[in-house]
Image (cartoon, rainbow, N blue to C red):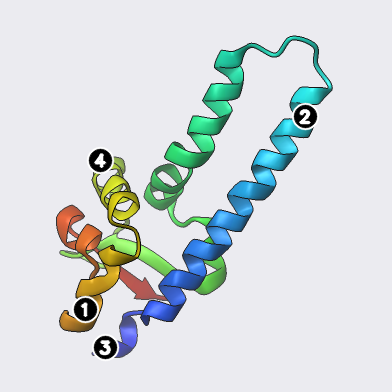
Amino acid sequence: MNENYPLLRARVQSSVIDLVFIIILMYLFTHLFAFFQNVPDEVRLGAFLFLFVGYEPICTALGATLGHYLSRIRVRKFSDTSQRINFLQSCIRYPIKVALGMYAYLSISRNPQRRAIHDLAAGSVMIKV
């Protein structure tokens, strides 16, 4: 049954892909803002918050982040793996994942479904597709 759940390697790979993607987007936004004079700080802050705070919860609730997609893994509801998690679950999951960092993955080896701490808190599970 564990063959449906990704190994830690795939989950870390997904996170690294997402981090590189966010850095590339930040670089592109910086160059885009350079074309305009007097870009308000609120716009810059909004772009930063969207990328670092909104990207993963929004993409996860809608289907998959780029890292999930390329790593062929998805976040699903633990109670029904055919359903995506909702935005609220995604908003619960992400800050715990960020706050705990790599420590969030400590529970993976002790859980038959390879659920990390943030998955346990949000009622989610990662699956391979």
Q: Are marks 4 and 3 in contact (CB under 8 Å)?
A: no
Vertical order, 1 against 30 (above or below): below
Quarter of the figure with residue 115: bottom left
**Which of pointers 2 and 3 lies earlier in the amino acid sequence?**
3
Q: Can you tell which mark lies on residue 32?
A: 2
* CA distance separating discs 4 and 3: 27 Å
**Which of pointers 2 and 1 lies earlier in the amino acid sequence?**
2
Q: Are marks 2 and 4 in contact (CB under 8 Å)?
A: no
Horizontal and vertical percent position of residue 80? 20, 65
Which residue matches tag 3?
Answer: 2
Which residue matches tag 1?
Answer: 113
Residue found at x 42% / y 71%: 11
Q: Amino acid at mark 4?
A: Leu
Q: Amino acid at mark 2?
A: Leu
Quadrant that contains the N terminus? bottom left
- Foreground pick, 32 / 80: 32
Q: Can you tell which mark lies on residue 48?
A: none
Q: Are marks 3 and 1 in contact (CB under 8 Å)?
A: yes
- Foreground pick, 77 / 48: 48
Question: For mark 1, does the 10 Å Cα neighbourhood hold few (<14), some (14 to 19), or many (20 or more) residues?
Answer: some
**Which of pointers 4 and 1 lies earlier in the amino acid sequence?**
4
Quadrant that contains the C terminus? bottom left
Can I make out residue 114 in this image? no
